[in-house]
Amino acid sequence: MSRKAFFISVLCLLAMGAAEAQWKWRDAKGNLQFSDLPPPQGTPEKDILQRPFVAKPSIVVSPVGAAASQAATATPSNSAAASAPSKAELDAAARQKREQDQEASRQKEEERRVAAQRRENCARAQANLRDLQSGQRLARTNEQGERVFMDSAQIANEVSRARDLITSECR
């Protein structure tokens, strides 16, 4: 075999790869069958091993009499067109996928925002706890705008509140 013939053969084999069978089933004798057409009517569902991506199982009514001969000579494109999803179905599926992606994106953004708020709350609570435990005299401003020093009971109360915040926000 010449090199030219060899390369042509390889190219033909590569081109045939795109047209490989999409259906795979076991026939009545147990032999594996491969085809771009669906298995014959009456093949048990358990024996159908592989379907094309777009093929959906459908109920086929067997034709009777003269219609049977016409159905037997029908082109494969008619059966393929019947099993392929319509443009409207594909558009609806694409729209639903986009909506799901947008919702997932919104949820992730909300989770990021909540996580950032928790980190900020955690940092504030930890800083507040450090100040409360520093031993310095702490003061608050009352309703009249006067500075009032906190006693040990008030500080203990605030320490408890700060620890509760740290427990809930610093996970």
Image: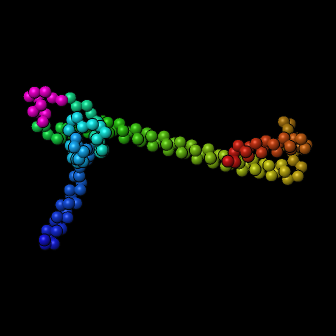
Residue 128 x, y percent position in the rendering: 78, 48
Please, which residue is most extreme toward the top here? 64
Query: Which residue: 54% across, 45% down?
Result: 108
Residue 149 x, y percent position in the rendering: 90, 44
Query: Which residue: 12% across, 31% down?
Result: 68
Residue 69 in the magenta stretch? The answer is yes
Query: Which residue: 36% across, 38% down?
Result: 93
Above-or-below relation of 7 to 51: below
Q: Is residue 115 left or right of residue 19?
A: right
Q: Is residue 141 visible?
A: no
Query: Which residue: 22% across, 31% down?
Result: 60
Please, which residue is most extreme toward the bottom here? 2
Above-or-below relation of 130 to 65: below
Q: Is residue 81 left or right of residue 99?
A: left
Tell me how the rendering is colored: rainbow
- Check the picture and name the quadrant holding the N terminus: bottom left
Task: Give the quarter of the image for residue 73.
Answer: top left
Residue 111 x, y percent position in the rendering: 58, 44
Residue 21 x, y percent position in the rendering: 23, 49
Q: Is residue 95 left or right of residue 5?
A: right
Total tally of numbered discs in the picture: 0
Which is nearer the eye, 131 or 37?
Answer: 37
Residue 152 in the magenta stretch? The answer is no
Task: Give the quarter of the image for residue 42.
Answer: top left
Which is nearer the eye, 60 or 138?
Answer: 60
SS assignment for the magenta stretch, majority: helix
Q: Which residues are magenta?
A: 62-72
Above-or-below relation of 14 to 55: below
Above-or-below relation of 128 to 93: below
Q: Is residue 62 visible?
A: yes
